Image (cartoon, rainbow, N blue to C red):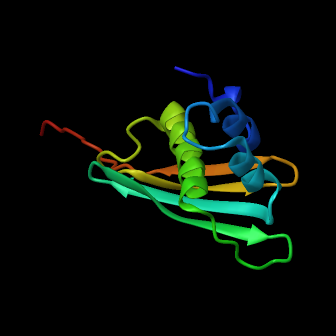
């Protein structure tokens, strides 16, 4: 399994995976150099089911940007791969949730993840 630091940015991930996905180099570059200034991805799951809840793309002028289906899949694949590397099984049992904030200008990715769990405490006494 790959180390989490292998692809710290979306740009590096896309560059490394462009031969795997059915995408042209121009489409990958369009995602990286297009009108997007930031991408926000939210995910959640529990009870053995998890999903990306939404992808919001902010344009350089502050407006909303619509990704193509192929571009959206690339972003989802990147996020799912990162989640599985550190939190495999995150969607099981009580589950978890999180958010990715991707700065398209700097390539930096801020990721927060919350793991849900049920806590219990047992005490025994002989009287």
Snapshot quadrant of residue 90: top left
Residue located at (56% from left, 32% from top): 20
Residue 86 visible (yes or no)? yes
Q: Residue at x 75, y 42 (%)?
A: 11
* Residue 53: % across, % down: 47, 64
Q: Residue furthest left?
A: 127
List x then y, in percent, for residue 2. 58, 22
Residue 105 appears at what percent x and percent y?
87, 54
Q: Please give left or right for residue 123 compared with residue 34 in the image.
A: left
Furthest residue to the top?
1
Q: Is residue 17 above or below residue 28?
A: above
Compare residues 66 and 22 and report the one nearer the observer.
22
Task: Please identify the quarter of the rendering in which residue 60 is found.
Answer: bottom right
Does 60 appear above or below 18? below
Q: Closest to the observer: 75 or 93?
A: 75
Residue drawn at (49%, 58%), measured in percent from left and top? 43
What is the x, y in percent for residue 77? 53, 44
Q: Residue at x 77, y 64 (%)?
A: 36
Q: Is residue 113 visible?
A: no
**Count of labels in the image:** 0
Horizontally, residue 4 falls left or right of residue 121, namely right
Q: Residue furthest bottom?
A: 63
Query: Front-most of 86 and 11?
Result: 11
The C terminus, quarter of image: top left
- Image position of 54 (left or right of 92): right
């Amino acid at each position: 399994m790959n180390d989490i630091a292998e692809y710290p940015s979306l740009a590096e991930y896309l560059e490394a995976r462009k031969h795997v996905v059915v995408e042209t180099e121009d489409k990958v570059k369009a995602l990286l150099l297009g009108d997007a200034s930031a991408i926000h991805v939210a995910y959640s799951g529990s009870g053995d089911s998890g999903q990306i809840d939404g992808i919001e793309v902010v344009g350089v002028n502050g407006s909303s940007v619509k990704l193509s289906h192929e571009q959206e899949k690339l972003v989802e694949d990147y996020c799912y791969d990162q989640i599985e590397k550190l939190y495999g099984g995150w969607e099981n049992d009580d589950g978890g949730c999180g958010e990715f904030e991707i700065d398209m200008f700097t390539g930096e990715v801020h990721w927060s993840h919350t793991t849900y769990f049920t806590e219990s405490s047992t005490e025994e006494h002989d009287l």
